Structure formats: structure tokens, C-alpha cells
Amino acid sequence: MGTIVSLQLYVENPAAVTAVFNTIEALETRLTVNREHSEVMSINHAAGKHPVTVSKLVFDLIQQAKAASLLPYSRFNLAIGPIVKLWKIGFNGHSIPPADEITHRLSLTSPHLIELDQTNHSVYLAKAGMEIDLGAIAKGYIADITKLVLAQYNIHQAIINCGGNVLTIGSSPLTSSQEWHIGLKRPFAAANSLLGILHVQNKSVVTSGIYERYFIFNKQLYHHIIDPFTGYPLDNELQSVTIISDSSLTGDIYSTILFGFGVRHGLNELEKHKNMGAIFVTKDQKIFIKSNQHFQFELLADDYELCQ
Ligand code: FAD
Ligand code: MG
Ligand code: MG
């Protein structure tokens, strides 16, 4: 998945570790758009030609991604693939595309043109050139599945980290409070340089941000979260949004959606979602927190300001 996946267990169980990594590889093989063949690629290859029947798992994930794309004001868009492939941000060969090519490809990104048939589990992309991209949701889904795999091995205390998607399972054996301490990275700094520490139990902690996958050209930063209304990297006051939730799938969806909302709209939205908390970090070094009692945050960086 273009990242390092790490798993920490507190009992010795090599079979469980193997099972988790085999499961992740199997899911990546079905969901990736970075190889010629996968279930999602078979849908993309058939765009404008015919519907493709996929497994229930892939169908369900696409259905959830489509629903997230159709939420009011959502800039999450599972049909963003043609634009992601054009920019190649985070991949070899990234560049600023010609404006007319962006405009053309925007016409291929309407989530309404993704037709789902519940009975056959088939997916049809109604225009040739359309492409589904599950990059903003799949790691969360995969993290949740690993929790189920570990439960089959009777493991109920662990941490899995799929590159920005951290899932803490159960309570921590490492602290007297039994809370896990999750470091929130300082944007654009070395991995061990922290903004602060989250204290959580049995929660997913997912971050979407502009500081892991980006390139700089003419002093301008181009990052990987695309605004589906413009076809350019989403430009607002934010550096990152971290979502704290029970499900990592929900966290992954909402880290991307609330990134698109920005601070004010995002904080308001969380009034409606008491099952989630969030941390918004802005480019001018302000931190806005809505905990909804899911976590505590300890600020470490004294050049960042905690705001209400
Ligand atoms: P999130 O904020 O959760 O999502 C951002 C990602 O979603 C973008 O990178 C893009 O892929 C997509 N996206 C951009 N704009 C939008 C939007 N408006 N709405 C919805 N989605 C959007 N990386 C590699 O370098 N090589 C690989 O071979 C590779 N294979 C992968 C296979 C799988 C199954 C997955 C899940 C990921 C893979 N990746 C790979 C990484 C992938 O390209 C994304 O960078 C990654 O999923 C981003 O996750 P995030 O949590 O950092 O960002
Ligand atoms: Mg993500
Ligand atoms: Mg996401």
C-alpha cells in the first residue's frame, strides 16, 4: 500500500502475525489501483463497456465510498481516480498537469455515474475513462479487518499502524492508566518529532494530511488530497485532520471529508457525530480539538497554539 505496516502484539504468536500480514496482502491485491489486475481494476478497465461483478467485500466497500461521496458538501469522491492518476502525487513521475486535461478528466469523476447493482454485486462506470480510487478508505477498512483476524487468535491487545491509520485494540499493557499513547507527528518534521500525544483506549486514530505525499514546484506545495470540484490539491487552512473513532473505516472516511470541510464546518459537523473526536491542525500552527470524550491530547510543541 505504498507504506510501512507495523503490528505490535504483547504475546508471542507468530501464527497470528502471519495471518494478519497475509490478510493485508490479500486485501491489497483485491483493492489496489496500482497494479494492472485487481477487482477494482477490473471495474475500471470495463468503464463505459459493461458492469463487473465483484466480491461482496469489494462491493460493500465501494457502496460505502459512494455513500460518503454523496454526503452534503462532501469533497470525498471515490471516482477521483482519473485525476489522481494524472497528477501522480506521491508516485514517480508526478507533475502539474495541463489545465485543459484536468478539466477534461473532471468530467469523468461524477460519483452519480457509478452504478451499483445490489443483487449481482456488480459495479458499472458509465463513462469510458472513469476510475474508482479507494485510497482514502481502504486502509481504514483493512485495519478493522486485522482486528477481527487477531480476535480469531484470541488477541485483544495490539496496535496496528498502516501508515497514518493507527488502530489500538483493547487496553494498553504498557501504561498504568491502560491507555495507549499515540504520537501525533509534527507536520513536515522527522517522524520522531511530535506535536503531541493522544491518550486513547480501543480506538482508531486516522490522520489525513498534506505533509506525507506531496511535491513542491516553484515554492508551491501540491499534496495528494484532491478537490473534486477543481481537480487541484484541496486548498484550505488545514495541514491535517486526525479522527478518533471506534471504526478505522469511519475514521478514514471522515478524515478525508472533514479535511475538505475545514476547521469551522468540521467542528460543527462533529456536533452531529458524537461517536467521533477530531484534531484539526492548521498551517498557521493552531490546533482545534473536539474530543467528544473519546481521547485526551497532551500538547508537546510549544510553538503550536491550542484553540477553542
Ligand atoms: P487519505 O486522506 O485517507 O486519502 C487520500 C488518498 O485518497 C489519495 O492519495 C488518493 O489516492 C485518494 N484521493 C485523493 N483525493 C480524494 C478525494 N477527494 N476523495 C477521495 N479520495 C481521494 N501507494 C504507492 O505509492 N504505491 C502503491 O503501490 C500503493 N498501493 C496501494 C494499494 C492500496 C490497496 C491502498 C489502499 C493504497 C495504496 N497506496 C499505494 C497508497 C495510496 O495511493 C494513497 O496514498 C493512500 O491510500 C492515502 O491514504 P491516506 O490515509 O494517507 O490519505
Ligand atoms: Mg487514510
Ligand atoms: Mg481517508
Image (cartoon, rainbow, N blue to C red):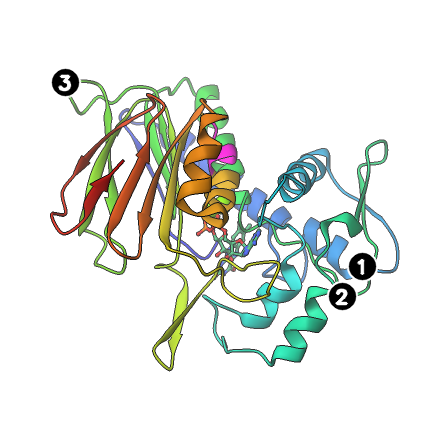
Name the residue located 64 percent from the left edge and 41 percent from the top edge: 65
Q: Which residue is mark 3?
A: 176
Q: Is residue 187 left or right of residue 214?
A: left
Name the residue located 17 percent from the left edge and 52 percent from the top edge: 193
- Measured in 3D between alpha carbons, the distance from the residue under mark 3 to the one under mark 1, in whole angstroms, is 54 Å
Circle nearer the N terminus (3, 2): 2
Q: Label 1 amino acid? A: Ala
Is residue 191 visible in the rendered structure shown here? Answer: yes
Q: Assign the C terminus to one quadrant of the image.
A: top left
User: Residue 201 or 104: which is nearer the viewer?
Assistant: 104
User: Residue 64 or 107: which is nearer the viewer?
Assistant: 107
Q: Which residue is mark 1?
A: 47
Q: Is residue 281 left or right of residue 26?
A: left
Q: Position of residue 102 (x, y in %)?
A: 64, 72
Label 1 lies in ligand 1 vicinity (Cβ under 8 Å): no
Numbered disc 1: secondary structure:
loop
Specify the segment rendered in magenta: 247-251
Q: Position of residue 44 (x, y in %)?
A: 74, 58
- Measured in 3D between alpha carbons, the distance from the residue under mark 1 to the one under mark 2, in whole angstroms, is 6 Å
Circle nearer the N terminus (3, 1): 1
Q: Label 2 amino acid? A: Gly
Image disc number at residue 129: 2
Is residue 146 visible in the rendered structure shown here? Answer: no
Name the residue located 19 percent from the left edge and 45 percent from the top edge: 305
Q: Is residue 81 above or below residue 12?
A: below
